[in-house]
Amino acid sequence: MELVAESIDIGTRAPTVLLNEADAAELGVHALERIQLRRDGKTTIGIVELTDELIPEGTLGVTRRLGHIDGTVTVSVAPQPNSVYYIRKKLDDIELERRELECIVRDIYEERLADIELGAYVSAMYTNGLSMEETMHLTSCMANIGETISWDDEIIADKHSIGGVAGNRITPILVPIVAAAGVKIPKTSSRAVTSASGTADTMEVLCDVEFSIGEIREIVETTGGCLVWGGAVNLSPVDDQIIRAETPLSLDPVGQLIASVLSKKKSAGSTHIVIDIPYGEGAKVESLAEARELAEDFNRVSDHLEMTTECAITNGSAPVGTAIGPVFEAREVLATLDGDGPNDLRLKAIRLADLLFESVGVDADAEELLDSGAADATFREILAAQNGDPGVEIADLSPGRHTQPVHADRDGVVTHINNRLVNEVARRAGAPKDHGAGLKLHRGVGETTTTDELLATVHAESTDKLADAVALLERVEMIRVRHPDEALVERI
Amino acid sequence: MELVAESIDIGTRAPTVLLNEADAAELGVHALERIQLRRDGKTTIGIVELTDELIPEGTLGVTRRLGHIDGTVTVSVAPQPNSVYYIRKKLDDIELERRELECIVRDIYEERLADIELGAYVSAMYTNGLSMEETMHLTSCMANIGETISWDDEIIADKHSIGGVAGNRITPILVPIVAAAGVKIPKTSSRAVTSASGTADTMEVLCDVEFSIGEIREIVETTGGCLVWGGAVNLSPVDDQIIRAETPLSLDPVGQLIASVLSKKKSAGSTHIVIDIPYGEGAKVESLAEARELAEDFNRVSDHLEMTTECAITNGSAPVGTAIGPVFEAREVLATLDGDGPNDLRLKAIRLADLLFESVGVDADAEELLDSGAADATFREILAAQNGDPGVEIADLSPGRHTQPVHADRDGVVTHINNRLVNEVARRAGAPKDHGAGLKLHRGVGETTTTDELLATVHAESTDKLADAVALLERVEMIRVRHPDEALVERI
């Protein structure tokens, strides 16, 4: 059937096309089915929604998501994507072969899968897990799709944290330290999956994070590093689709995590990577044994892709730093680069940077680069190169104006701050999408407190979201305070 | 925030609302997030899509799916539904408690879940399975939501097949047999999940299938039975949402299946039920042991709900009858009621009806009711009561006009007809949504054939869908023909 395509101003998530019901009946398609649009030898898949009046017969309404299509298009019923069979196979807990994973990755890339199917994919990977073979295949399939960057330099450094620890904004401190030593570090970061803020969300408070590959190259040639969002460039583009599906359910299966991280590093042309694996109560990885296993898997998959990876197993049982949420974390990054941040954040950034220097074989001292102001200067050069204000000060950044204090309910010592709950409270308060939403921690683990003393303050940009965060806070113990005499964590 | 709601003519699957980007920014919501609309004390959840021009600032575009809402509404960010945590818990393979299942069922009913989350729900239930406790709880939660029918009669008969066998259109033959014996049988059926046609799809060829509870009561009081679509009435409405999510992936987890069937029966006021459990190669249940286990589970859950269930374990290794797809099956039903259908279909309907007579303690003979024309007369009364043509003849029903013959590739005997592939070919050809799509089988299992003899004909209403079916046929062996001397099914 031939229809005349016409742009329609609706921003949908799916590649939606609007069909008049009469045309749909003739074509034999129903709402949510897929159709193929062919024009000038190019085929696009659209997902059908129906209308009586908005689109006249003979016309096809093309929403923004599909890009610009106009003129006459040949429309036909699209076949069901093969990857649906492979997703079902994985739900049956049968190992997938390389070509099957390739097909799934390709179909996700080309947006052939409906949300129900994407939900099933992340569920299958989460609940049945990926084998080492599957992880290796998935990683290289994901790296092979989309653009890649190649560099003239022999050494391209990179860094990643598997996340799960609230605060922990190491990257914006480490990148300028490394760049200041003359080692190129073109860092692309994700947005938050299950945490309150990803590096890209935090950096967005200070500067732009969406750049083309050409622009990234220019920023890195000028400053030695960059702090951009990986999703804006077409490096491992499938990853962002998968993250979108994982987010509502807070799923983050191990094999998928490795594939996400290493496919991006491979596409970005990285040669030496340090990976931060925090472990402990409330972190993504609970035990040291698990952390070691994950580190070995990272090393094995990156060997397979011919990259050098150093894994740093770190303490992840409590937040690092005192700030959670994009604006709060940006403030703490500025403070640390200025010599004034929390000690745990500062020391961790220094230690990871030194590990990277050791791995690439460069004689540099991270502490010196930080204390001399060299890292701060480089950071502000990066800000300027990324269209931010290089003179930005902490006072310029305002947290959300709706607040809720969290008080101690007894005298005692802070024995635990639950990362998952801290992240969840901050997310309910609106983070990371609302930049000003988040938490400021006023007491750390091991510090003493008295009844009614302020332990933390939750900030939000809207009263609804603040109420949502408060509703959670009332049900759970985000910050655990115990009398020093109480030996038990809990009694069951 | 207060916005003026305005209907917009788009038929979406999700309860979509269109927001101007400026309003969305002020509200702090993004595409695909949920907002609450409050008006006259009533709260509705909408899923956000954004527009620049289609909807002016201060206005809220309400799509058809949300029903009629206009005037000023109070709009706020909706909290994340709690059931998301329970879905994740089930993905972690932890048994759900009654209140957690209740919460999931309630959120599905109120359409609080996005498609990604619904996809994860059916995936979790499929891959990790449901315990007997979970199945009982889920069944009664599903039965408790929506409307119920109560009858003055002490005995209300019902019938169900777990499906998976192509053809097998027993219900439209059994219902008029039972009704003709004076036993009330208000049959509600599903549409197809993984098969080429459900009873509701087949009946829709002959008459209306969507009626209110008041209308169903009237049809049953007049004719003794009905053959309607369960999804049109609000009996266990959650089931249809779940089926919609299962369909694209052809998932149908056992516990969910039992809950689907029995929650509908309970809501419909049924007291005595016969359940057809076909088993064998290519059926939903592969082994006799599995079929027995399922039968016991059905009995246990229906005891819990105070209903009497008889399970009939039947041969499900090949299609029953010769017709697959709505139009084809409707033709075969008419033929069988007229004394002229395939023998296997006729005998199975008779046997299941007799089992039901035995269970309710009524002295009636199914074969006699069929051969005397009493069942046919009752069927046509039901057609008339459901706005169909009581004088309909087989010649009035036309299969899809685009056809593809399937020929034998050798001399031999038909040793197997694969139900799953028959259903899949018919579905690719457009069944059940395209009524005329499907297959006619010309040879049954055990019959001899010669090279190039016609084994089956595939019909479709569109050439695209026919091509899609043919592509599958070329890859698989839907009908297995072997020389009588060949002892092996396959050599590996």
Image: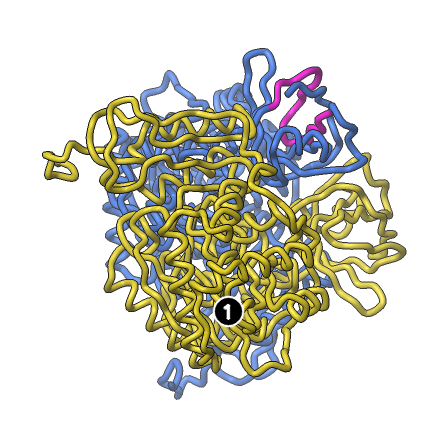
Chain colours: A yellow, B blue
The quarter of the displayed image where residue B201 is located: top right
Q: Amino acid at mark 1?
A: Asp
Q: Position of residue A104 (x, y in %)?
A: 54, 66
Residue range corresponding to the magenta coloring: B59-75
In the picture, which quadrant includes the N terminus of chain A? bottom right
Front residue of A36 and A331 = A331
* Among the 4 quarters of the image, the one containing residue B387: top right
**Residue B15 spot, x, y in % from top left:** 61, 33
Q: Hey, which quadrant is residue B73 in on the image? A: top right
Quarter of the image that includes the C terminus of chain A? top left
- Residue pointed to by mark 1: A158
Q: Is residue A449 above or below residue B129?
A: above
Q: Residue at x 16, y 39 (%)?
A: A489
- In this view, which residue lies farthest toward the top? B40
* Residue reaching furthest to the front: A372
| Residue closest to the eye, A435 or A46 | A435
